[in-house]
Each structure stands twice: as C-alpha cells, then as structure tokens.
Image (cartoon, helix red, strand yellow):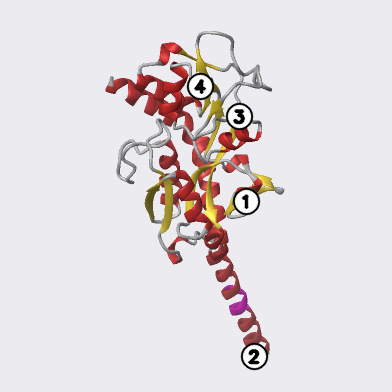
Amino acid sequence: MMGRIVGLKGILLIVIFAMTGIAMSAAPVAAESATLRICHEDKSYFPFLGVATDRDEAYPGILLEHIYGALGRLSLKSTLIKAPWKRCLKMLEHNEVDATFAAIYTPERERFARFPMANGKPDSARAIQQVEYPVFSQIQGAEIWNGKSFISENIVVAAPLGYVAAAMLKKSSHSPAHNVSLTDGLKLIDKGRLDGFVVERFIGLKALESLKLSDRFRLSKKPYLVADWFVILSHGFYKDHPVLAEQIWTEIGASRTRNNKSLIKKYLAHERDRK
C-alpha cells in the first residue's frame, strides 16, 4: 500500500510539473526576449505617425499608440529606428530589425516577412489599421478614376516610392517615369504636370492643408485601394518567439478594435486646438 501511495505521489508531481510547464509556455514570452527592434518610416504622417514618436510622447501617432499599448500589456520593451520605408523593409528582410509598420500584404512581402494569418489569409482582425487610398486630383475637370479604371490610358498618377499603390500603378502603366514624393506630386498636380496622386485619405488631406491647396483638389468618390495595414515581423523573430509574435498581433488588433475611434477623435481635436 505504501509503495502504491508513493507511486501516486510521484505521478502527481509529474503532472504538476507538466502543467506548470504548459502554463509557463502559454504566458507572455516577453520576459525571456530581447527588446523588440521596430523600424518605421522617417516621416510624419498625421494622424498615424507623429513627429516625436518616443514612448512617453503624448501624441506619437495612432499606430504607435496601438503598438505601445500592445507591448505594454505583454511587458515587452521596444526601441525605434527611423528610416526610409524601403530601407525598413530591407532591414526586416535581413533580420536587422524585428518589426516594421505599416505594411499591406502582398505575396512578395510574405517571402521576407511574417504577417498575422488566419486560414491561410492575412488576418484583418489583427491589422493595426484599415484604410482607404483615394485618387487626389485637380478639382477642375472630370474625375479621373471611376472605381475600376482611369478615364484615359494617358492618365499619369503617382504614389509614394515602395508603396503597394505605386506597384499597382506601375503594373497598369499609369505611373510617371520618375519617383515623385507626396508633396512634390501634389504641387505638380496643381501646376497641371501630373494627373493624380494615390495616398491614404488622412495623410493626403493633411498634406494639402499644409500646402494650402485644399480648395484646389478633389478626392475620388471611390477609392483606388482599400487595405489593411499590418505590423510585420522578421522571419528570425517569429522563429525564435512564435507564441509572443502571435500575442503581439492579437493585442494590436484588440487595441484597434477598442481604441481606434477614440484615438482618431483625440488626434483630430489636438490638430484643431493647434490652429
């Protein structure tokens, strides 16, 4: 009988240790991981990315508010690196950083980056933002985009270098011969030397306001592109921390669902107060 009791105690101890191990593996992995190295574009894009983007800033941008909130709930530290967008993607490809944002899914990008997936497709529920890209053009004349195609084969429309919209325009033979920045593109449109520019709605409107050109432009009634923006991770980081990676995406999606509307109101009110 004593031997049986000892045997049962031994089995119980094994079960307890096994359950403890399972519980530890299911908990956030932040404690064992290095600081998350995040690259983001070296520009200010109201309201998504602020001029000052440190963690203690009051208005770092909506995207960083979601990211900081998610990392805080996982007790994960981070460090930010600012670089041109194409450089951020290249650094991620070579595992020089662990994450970058905000990226639209393409099969090509999946080759060098990890996206949150569900049933073999990008998981919209865990996107950091859902956005529209209208075509910005002169207010005079006909609208150049009807929701499916441009009104003429000769229409020339630009988009920021390295963006999915730029690749789409190039594929459809509507892109200019040379790369054009957002500010330069809008100025060229105003001078009649470019037909249109594709950029996220809030970002484009803010650029027009800064250039004092708001009353000279129209936005297409139907967007050129509707997309999810994601925080994407390096293959190296995902390989080392698969559970943590999934937790990061889940927390980011939850933050967007809970807080996005209030954050947009916060940033719009702050912008009004500054005027």
Would residue 6 be found to the left or right of residue 236 on screen? right
Q: Amino acid at mark 4?
A: Leu
- In the rendered structure, which segment of residues is drawn in magenta? 12-16
Front of the two marks 2 and 4:
4
Q: Quadrant of residue 10?
A: bottom right
Residue behind mark 1 = 110
Residue at the extreme left of the image, as rendered:
274
Mark closer to the chain start, 4 or 3? 4
Compared across the picture, whether 205 is left or right of 239 comes to left
Question: Mark 4 touching mark 3, by CB under 8 A?
Answer: no
Q: Nearer the viewer, mark 1 or mark 4?
A: 4
Instruction: Look at the numbered disc 4 and give the secondary structure of its residue.
Output: loop
Q: Which three-letter amino acid code belongs to the residue tagged 1? A: Glu
- Please state the horizontal and vertical placement of residue 40, each as a whole percent of the image: 43, 46
Location of residue 104 with respect to 215 vertically, above or below? below
How dense is the environment of label 4, judged by Cα within 10 Å: few (below 14), some, or many (20 and up)?
A: many
Residue 13 magenta-highlighted: yes
Label 1 vs 3, first from the N-terminus = 1
In this rendered view, identify the residue nearer to me: 38 or 180. Answer: 180
Task: Report how far apart the C-alphas of labels 2 and 4 lie in the structure.
Answer: 90 Å
Q: Earlier in the sequence, mark 2 or mark 4?
A: 2
CB contact under 8 Å: marks 1 and 4: no
Q: Which residue carries the number 2 mark? A: 2
Identify the residue under disc 4. 194
Q: Which mark is residue 225?
A: 3
**Does residue 220 appear left or right of residue 118 in this picture?**
left
Residue extending farthest to the top is: 141
